[in-house]
Image (tube, rainbow, N blue to C red):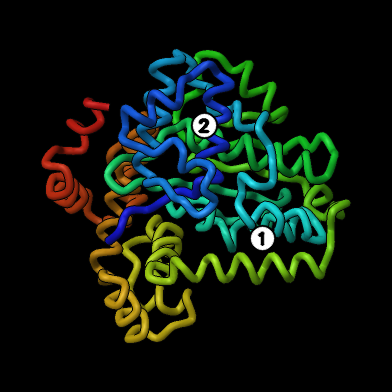
Amino acid sequence: MRERSTSSNWALGIVQALEMGGVDCRAIFAELGLDYAALNDPDARFPQDAMTRLWQRAVELSGNPAIGLNMAKVVRPASFHVVGYALMSSRTLKDGLTRLVRYQRIIGEGADLSFRPTPRGYELTLAIHGDRLPAARQSMEASMAYALAFCRWMTGQPIRPLQVLFQGPPPADLQPFEQVFQGPLQFHADHYGLLFERADMDMQLPTANESLAQLHDRFAGEYLARFSDTRVTHSARQVLCRLLPQGEPKRESVAQALHLSQRTLQRRLQEEGGSFQQLLDDTRRELAQQYLAQPALSLLEIAYLLGFADPSNFFRAFRRWFGLTPGEYRAQL
């Protein structure tokens, strides 16, 4: 399966945020074997794992674990590629964020977004998957900070989330997070997310333009078609992430959620170079890495979140994936 990639537009936003924090990204790009000049090529893309290494080196060099929050200061529609303009031309924030979920693979193929109504409002949830490396925490924090800042910028209103959810423990210094998000922060959550008030999501955008929205939809759809070789794989992975905490998902359930027959699902996955069982295994492996980075989750809880009815099956699968027990892997983290 080919590597997940990130658009040069989003990579450029990350670089601007890091350079604002005093990091010499040109030197890091040379160190990682990346083409710094390609940041200005709108069609260029960078491997997701390379972006993870960029975040890791930036934190090491700056000594600032909250450097990802600088993304809130570099807001510009182009960071979201054509998706940014599709958001701006949407009627309401709710319509805009729905488009963001639909087209987010253009920005970064490693991201899984969802946007749904809840009893309290609307929640935008985020997960980022790498290929061989678990995504950097700063990548998640940067994406959330940018999404919120973009909503504020589009509406011209100081939108305050009802809740900001983070996986993992709170940072040593909360002040930068309080300053950027301006809402209640919850750590040790089971996902990253922003909970918005309904009234904020129903807010009309001053840049709304139905004709432009349709035009940008067409551009985004055409661009997204370039990734059609993994489109079903990506959609099936999102369904698996949602179903796993309820037990091991059956192919029938995933096919049903995608409005496909089981046979069609299997054929499409095979055309994309995989199989249902392989995708299930890959998804569990990626999620296991993310969950083990959260000290609040016990190994037993992680086994059940990954859909293993018997924890011993999780331990066996983990040793097959990484050659270590989950406890040994966590100790190395």
Q: Earlier in the sequence, mark 2 or mark 1?
A: 2
Residue that label 1 marks: 98
**What crowding class fits label 1: few (fewer than 14 Cα within 10 Å), some (14-19), or many (20 or more)?**
some
From this view, report whether residue 234 is shown above or below residue 319.
Answer: below
Q: Is residue 312 left or right of residue 172?
A: left
Question: Residue 79 at what x, y percent from top left?
Answer: 61, 44
Callout 1: SS: helix
The quadrant holding residue 102 is: bottom right
Residue 214 located left or right of residue 71: right
Residue 89 lies, in percent from the top left, at 78, 59
* Residue located 82% across and 34% down the image: 158
Q: Determine whether, in the image, residue 328 is placed left or right of residue 18.
A: left
Residues at discs 2 and 1 in contact (Cβ within 8 Å): no
Q: Residue 91, position in %: x, y? A: 82, 61
Front residue of this view, candidates 206 and 235: 206
Query: Image point 68% across, 26% down: which residue?
Result: 180
Which mark identifies residue 15? 2
Q: Residues within 10 Å of mark 2 (few under 14, many from 20)?
A: many
SS at mark 2 in the image: helix
